[in-house]
Amino acid sequence: MAEPLKNMINTRSVSVLADGLAAAWAPFPRARFTARALAGLDGLELKERVRHVSAVLHDALPLPYPQAAEIVRESVSRTPLDMWSGWPATDHTAVHGLGHLDAAMATLAVLTPHATGEFAVRPFLERHRDDALKIMYGWAESPDEHLRRLASEGSRPRLPWAARVGWLMTPGPTLPLLDLLRDDPSEYVRRSVANHVNDLAKDHPQAAIELLARWRSDGGSHVERVLRHAARGLLRAGHPEALALVGATPGSGSVGALTLESDTVAVGGRLTFTLTVTAEAPGPLLLKYALRRPGSRRVFHLAQREADEAGAAFVVRKSHSFRPVTTRREPPGPRELDVIVNGRVAATTTFTLTSDDTLTDR
């Protein structure tokens, strides 16, 4: 099992941050900072650890924020920070720099190539909407791909793990940022743009469709890949206009055979199924599958096939893992498997998920 992320805020990460701060400011109390930052860390979760180290950092820099920020920025040139050593520094910026927009945003700009400022920028967007957004417009034209990505990622409507900023949930204010970055030379940036539009589509699907249609009309070197990634949530939901946008005929395509390797699968095992799909029109066949039980329906990508003509047939085989994960536990019981072709459920079959003990007793 992978090590919990919280354990990445540890002796090493605290020491790296301390080294940089001590090199940037001779009075920095390195030993006291390290001891206090590590005290009680084992009992805290990830974000609690970040906030704890951030608070100790604030106590170790008893200076007006602009001076403290200057030391933090200088520390980056003195030691190579990474996500884990730098995260408490971005949090310190978010908590203590709110009254000093220019100094704080300049600090995030220096930190983000080493430890992304996407979470830390949210309070500034909340409190200093127009002025913070103006600075981010400048980031979108930076030669540094990390800053360009921060402009898109930090302003995402539904940024995972981040605080929601109410006005970002309305389409409009961030669209100029996305227009600047939609055909960025960096895939790192373009993926953020696509994720931003995918967020937008969850609450405002029509606005997202219109934006993507405009981008296709405007053209660009990477428009098709960005479009498909940005529309993935709409495609998963079978949105007709999104399907048409990628060239698929909504609801077109049939499944002539759907077979399971076994109709009983143990928790921890794999469901393996095979199907034959036939095109009813030329163009893409976007295949998804859904797993259903009472109160739950989850949709997954299955495959995509390109049909040159109506009647073209394809055989697809898939194996789905029921390995337990910490974020989701699947209870044993009956299940339904749907195969979805271009947004329409084209075939359904059933199976039973059993516990390991059930199979052992057989």
Image (tube, grey):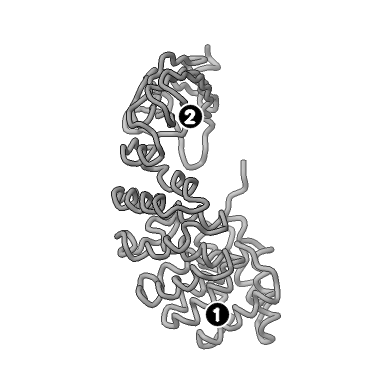
Q: Could you say whether the residue bearing mark 1 is in a helix, strand or loop?
A: helix
Locate residue 209, reporting x and y percent. Answer: 33, 48
Q: Which residue is drawn at 39% across and 43% down?
A: 233
Residue that appears at 37% across and 28% down: 292
- Tell me the kind of residue under disc 2: Glu
- Residue placed most toward the observer, 281 or 28: 281
Quadrant in the rendering for residue 170: bottom left
Characterize the local packing of mark 2: few (<14), some (14-19) or many (20 or more) Cα atoms within 10 angstroms.
some
Q: What element carries label 2?
A: strand
Q: What separation in Å lies between label 2 and label 1 (alpha carbons)?
A: 61 Å
* Residue to which mark 1 is pinned: 59
Between 174 and 18, the one lying in front of the other is 174
In the rendering, at what x and y percent does residue 186 appear? 57, 57
The 10 Å Cα crowd at callout 1, few under 14, some 14 to 19, many 20 or more, is: few
Residue 114 location (% of width, % of height): 61, 66
Q: Earlier in the sequence, mark 2 or mark 1?
A: 1
Label 1 amino acid? Asp
Asked whether residue 44 is in view, the answer is: no
| Nearest to viewer (mark 2 / mark 1) | 2
Is residue 107 placed above or below 299 in the rendered structure?
below
> Label 1 near label 2: C-beta < 8 Å?
no
Answer with the quarter of the image where residue 40 lies: bottom right
The residue beneath circle 2 is 306
Pick the quarter of the image with the N terminus. Answer: top right
Q: How many labels does the image show?
A: 2
